[in-house]
Image (cartoon, rainbow, N blue to C red):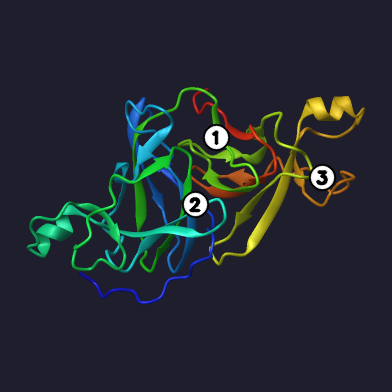
Amino acid sequence: MKKLMTAFAVCALAGAVYAQIESQNIVGYQTVPLTQNGYTFSCATLAPIGMTGGNMILGDIAANENFSPFEDAIQIFDSTGSKILMATYVSQAVLDANEITGVEAGWWDLADVNFENGDLNDTVIQFGSSMTVFTGYAGAGLVYVGELVQSDNPLPLVQNGYTFLGNASPVDLLLGDITANENFSPFEDAIQIFDSTGSKILMATYVSQAVLDANEITGVEAGWWDLADVNFENGDLNDTVIVAGQGMTVFTGYAGAAIIIPNPLP
């Protein structure tokens, strides 16, 4: 195994993700490439087969052969922005190559180099939740295996906190394809998207046609607008490309708010 990485940025968020779907059938897999020497904010693009209750487990996600165990890692944060998990992926091939037995392939705490504390494969995560990923290697990727969600997919948001989610479909979208429900408050609630250095590149709010009509606002496109553009002067952000699996951070102050990812099937 490669040398253990000794430093990992705690608060950095991710950048652009580019992915190619490997199967157009209902069941398939997709490898989402990771930014080398940077952070990728990524969510699952396929739901586990037979998933119930909107949950999946960390073991449903794999990393490819260029993801380096005990160097590369994922981080998962809670709604306050506090880190709750930092894990690395150890494949069966790596275990076999190092003649390690009695150890489960999958996700392990980054510091658990001797495999003493048990794997993290059964960690439950909400489908659509995103994670921050760091790799130092070209060609590294996360592998999502499962089935297409064949309907519009509402992703619930935490009230008065941050929800880490993303484009949980295997196809690239425009931001305008993604909507928010009636409990998402325009010019109060917002999404943020970050690049691979952790710098914010977009902060946008959703304005529905119903809100425009109720306020008798004309000549304005429904959809996503810069949070500071309260007079609709600088143009909407609907044409912003959100590639498959790309993550975002969302804040709402309201109960029942959700981001809706559209059905990926035409």
- Return the x and y of residue 173 as percentages of the image width and height: 57, 38
Q: Which residue is mark 2?
A: 17
Disc nearer the start of the sequence (3/2): 2
Point out the frontmost of discs 3 and 1.
Answer: 1
Neighbour class for label 1 at 10 Å: few (<14), some, many (≥20)? many
- Report helix, strand or loop for mark 1: strand
Residue 42, relative to residue 218: is it above or below? below
Identify the residue at horizontal 47%, vertical 60% (top origin).
83
Visible residue check, residue 210: yes
Q: Are marks 1 and 2 in contact (CB under 8 Å)?
A: no
Question: Dividing the image into 4 quarters, which one contains the N terminus?
Answer: bottom left
Between residue 12 and residue 63, name the one nearer to us. Answer: 12
Visible residue check, residue 18: no
Neighbour class for label 3 at 10 Å: few (<14), some, many (≥20)? few
Q: Which mark is residue 155?
A: 1
Q: Which residue is mark 3?
A: 235
Is residue 72 rendered to the left or right of residue 224? Answer: left
Identify the residue at horizontal 64%, vertical 40% (top origin).
175
Is residue 182 rendered to the left or right of residue 129? Answer: right
Tell me the amino acid under the disc marked 3: Gly
Disc nearer the start of the sequence (3/1): 1
Is residue 197 rendered to the left or right of residue 188? Answer: left
Neighbour class for label 2 at 10 Å: few (<14), some, many (≥20)? many
- Return the x and y of residue 198 as percentages of the image width and height: 57, 64
Tell me the amino acid under the disc marked 2: Val
Identify the residue at horizontal 55%, vertical 25% (top origin).
152
State how far apart marks 3 and 1 are (Cα): 26 Å
Identify the residue at horizontal 36%, vertical 62% (top origin).
73
